[in-house]
Image (spheres, grey):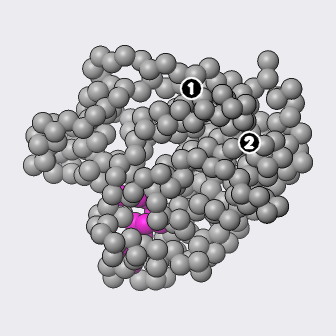
Amino acid sequence: MAKNLVVILGPTASGKTAMAAKLAFDLRGEIISADSRQVYKGMDIGTGKDLNQYTVRGEKIKYHLIDVIAPQEEFSLYDFQTKFYQIFSDLAGKKILPIMVGGTGLYLESVLAAYDLPPAPADEQLREKLSGKTKSELQEILLSLKPRVHNITDMEDTRRLVRAIEIERARKGTFRLKEKPEIDAAVFGIKWDRAVLRRRITGRLEERMNQGMIEEVETLHKEGLSWERLESFGLEYRLAALYLQNKLSYREMTQSLNTGIHQFAKRQETWFRRMEKRGTIIHWIEGDNYTLLKESVLKYLK
């Protein structure tokens, strides 16, 4: 039976977006992003949206789950999975091939492993009860509910801590499983030699800085995002925010960014290996061999 979803994953700077866009052009598909930060409007450079890559031979490739929410709002794993299912079902009904692309392992696996996630509406009574807690106290509460926290940014921001506690409390309660569409995915990973990927990461960081990543963070702050909120969005936004507050020199910021992004790529690769151990079959494509990717994908769509 032909697969009904193509997945292209890989670490940061692996070139997965460009490869997915070409594939969508050739197969008349549409992209569904699996990136935890690209959902936010106005956060383009720091999240590496690379929106120019969604134009192939003069044609704009349609994409989903990019620029769908304001950065002042929260977007959870449950939100992602729910919206993904809606988009997937809509595309399937139109006979359009969905191509999920991204590097957020938790988002990818929530679909591929069909996580059972509870709806977790805001609990005002709980929020009021937690409002007087320190960050360390909130961390203890979350860890008591969920000893292994996958998203470490949840541990560093008080709003995310409270939201994570709400979700875990809902998970432990009773809830009705929502119906999930039948998904049979062909999963492909973009892989580079370690030394080559390191050069690509460093080059991409330099490109982002030249594009105005610092100015982007400064603009977001002027538009009302607190420094704490900006720092909660992860490495690029945290370090840029610290630099803009004169807590880091420019050199300290760029060196820390370069080191941190390399470490992040390693964590992504570790997550992908763990997915394989848990049963996800990933077909690895070396470098930017688009011809091989397309040929491999077509075998699973016949």
Q: Which residue is depicted at the point 67% across and 29% down?
A: 92
Vertical position of residue 200 compared to residue 138: above or below: below
Q: Which residues are magenta?
A: 232-243
Residue at disc 2, secondary structure: loop
Q: Main secondary structure of the magenta part?
A: helix
Observer-nearest of 163 and 261: 163
Q: Quadrant of residue 182?
A: top right
| Kind of residue sitting beneath label 1 | Ala
Who's the residue at 53% across and 61% down the image? 47
Residue 12 pos. (x, y %): 62, 56
Q: Is residue 167 magenta?
A: no
Image: 44 above or below 160: below
- Disc 1 crowd rating (10 Å Cα; few below 14, some 14-19, many 20+) is few
Snapshot quadrant of residue 181: top right
User: In the drawing, what numbered circle is on residue 29?
Assistant: 2
Which quarter of the figure is the N terminus placed in?
Answer: top right
Q: Is residue 147 visible?
A: yes
**Earlier sequence position, callout 2 versus callout 1:** 2
50 above or below 285?
below
Measure the C-alpha gap from mark 2 to mark 1. Answer: 22 Å
How far across and how far down the image is residue 58, in percent?
Answer: 79, 63
Indicate which disc residue 113 carries: 1
Residue 98 appears at what percent x and percent y?
Answer: 68, 37
Residue 257 position, x and y percent, is 51, 69
Q: Amino acid at mark 2?
A: Gly
Q: Is residue 237 magenta?
A: yes
Q: Residue at x 21, y 49 (%)?
A: 136
Q: How many marks?
A: 2
Nearer the observer, 181 or 102: 181
Check disc 1 and report its element: helix, strand or loop.
loop
Specify the quadrant that holds the C terminus.
top right
